[in-house]
Amino acid sequence: MINQLKSLLEQNTNFLITTHKSPDGDAIGSSVAWYEFLKAIGKKPFLLLPDEPTASLLPFLANLDYRIFDLETEQALATINQHEVLFCLDYNGSGRVGKNMEVIFGLFEGPKVMIDHHPNPDHFCELMISRPEVCSTAQLVYACIDELGLMEHLNVACGIGIYLGILTDTGSFRFPSVDKQTHLTLAHLIEIGVEHYKIHEAIYDVNTMDRLRLRGYAIAEKLEIISGLPIGFISLTKEELERFNYQKGDTEGLVNTILSIEGISIAAFFKEDKDNIKISFRSKGDYFVNEFLNRHFEGGGHKYAAGGVSYESLDVTLSKFKSLVEELIP
Ligand code: 5GP
Ligand code: MN
C-alpha cells in the first residue's frame, strides 16, 4: 500500500487534495498537513474544498493555494484534470463532498487515493489507506509520512495541520481512540517547534458573545433528557438561531456538552438549516450511534460520533427520533 503511494508521489507532480463538506478541524488539519508535506518534497499541491469552513479554521488556510467548489464551480471544474492524482482526505464515500462537488469523481481521469479513518469505506478510490483504528486522519497523515521514510520533510507548517486534526478529532486528546502513538506524535510535533497552545487558543478561545449566549439559551431552555434513558438532546429552530445572530460553527461542540451530564451516554443535536435538519450524535461506553443514523437519517460516521440529515420538519424529525430511540440501547 505505502509502496504504491510512494510510486505515485515519485511519478507525479500535480496533486489535488479534497476533503469533506462542512470541513472540520481534522478535514482542514489533515489537508493542510498533506499539502505542506507534498510542498516540502517538491510537489505542487492544490486544495479543493466543497464549501467554506468555519471562521476559526480559515487562518490555517492562509498560506495554501485553495479554492471553494461551491463559490467557484466553473474554475474548479476547468482545472480538475490539470492534476495527476486526486487525494481524498478524511472521508469514506464520494457523497461526503456534497451533491455539487461529487461530479468531480466522474470527471477526474487519474488515480484516486483515500487517506481516511472512517469505518466502512466505499471503494471509490484505486488506492485506499483506510485505518478506522487511528484517532484522526491527521495522525494517519503522520503515519504515512513515517512509513514513506520521509520524516525529514516534516516541517512546522505540516506539524500544525497534524496537531490541529488530532486536537479536534479527539476532544482534546481524551477519546478512547487516543493511544500511545497519539501522544508520541504530539511530542514529536512540539519537539520540531509546533506552538501547541496557539492552536488551542485559535480553536477554543474565539467565542463571540452571541455564540456563548446561544449556548446558554440552548442548555437552559432547550436541553431535554429522555425519561428513563441515558439520552439527552437539544434542538434549535432557524428562528432561535437567528435570534442569536447565528454564524457557522456557533453550535460546534454543543452536543458534547450534553454528554458531560453524569449518567448521559448518548447526546443528540438537531439544527434546522435552510432546507433540512442537520443531526449530530455523540456517545460513549457501550452505546454506538453511527448505524442508527445510517438506518434512519441518511448518515453515518464513527461509533461514538456520527451525523445525519432529515428533510422533514423539525417537529416530525424529533417525533421520529423519540419513537426510534430505544434502538440505541443495546
Ligand atoms: P458532526 O456531528 O461533527 O457533524 O459529525 C460527526 C461525524 O459524523 C463526522 O466525523 C462524520 O464522520 C460523520 N457525519 C456527519 N454527518 C454525516 C452525514 O451526513 N453522513 C455521513 N455518512 N456521515 C456523517
Ligand atoms: Mn476525522
Image (cartoon, rainbow, N blue to C red):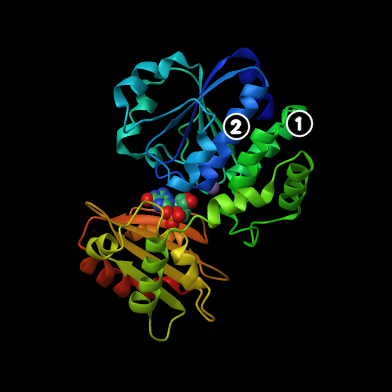
How many angstroms separate mark 2 from mark 1 (CA)? 13 Å
Q: x%, y% of residue 205? A: 54, 57
On the image, the x and y values in percent for residue 195 come to 69, 45
Number of marks in the rendered image: 2
Q: Write the residue at 24% across / 60% down.
A: 238
- Around disc 2, counting alpha carbons within 10 Å, would you say few (fewer than 14), some (14 to 19), or many (20 or more)? many
Q: Position of residue 16 (x, y in %)?
A: 49, 24
Residue 151: which disc? 1
Front residue of 114/243: it is 243
> Where on the picture, by quarter, is residue 38?
top right
Q: Are marks 2 and 1 in contact (CB under 8 Å)?
A: no
Identified by mark 1, the residue type is Met
| View extreme (bottom): residue | 228
The residue depicted at 56 percent of the width and 41 percent of the height is 29
Q: Which residue is labeled 2 in the image?
A: 34
Asked whether, in this view, residue 153 is left or right of residue 329, the answer is: right
Q: Residue, x 37% and y 38% (percent of image)? A: 51
Q: Quadrant of residue 124?
A: top left
In terms of depth relative to the viewer, which is nearer, 323 or 260? Answer: 260
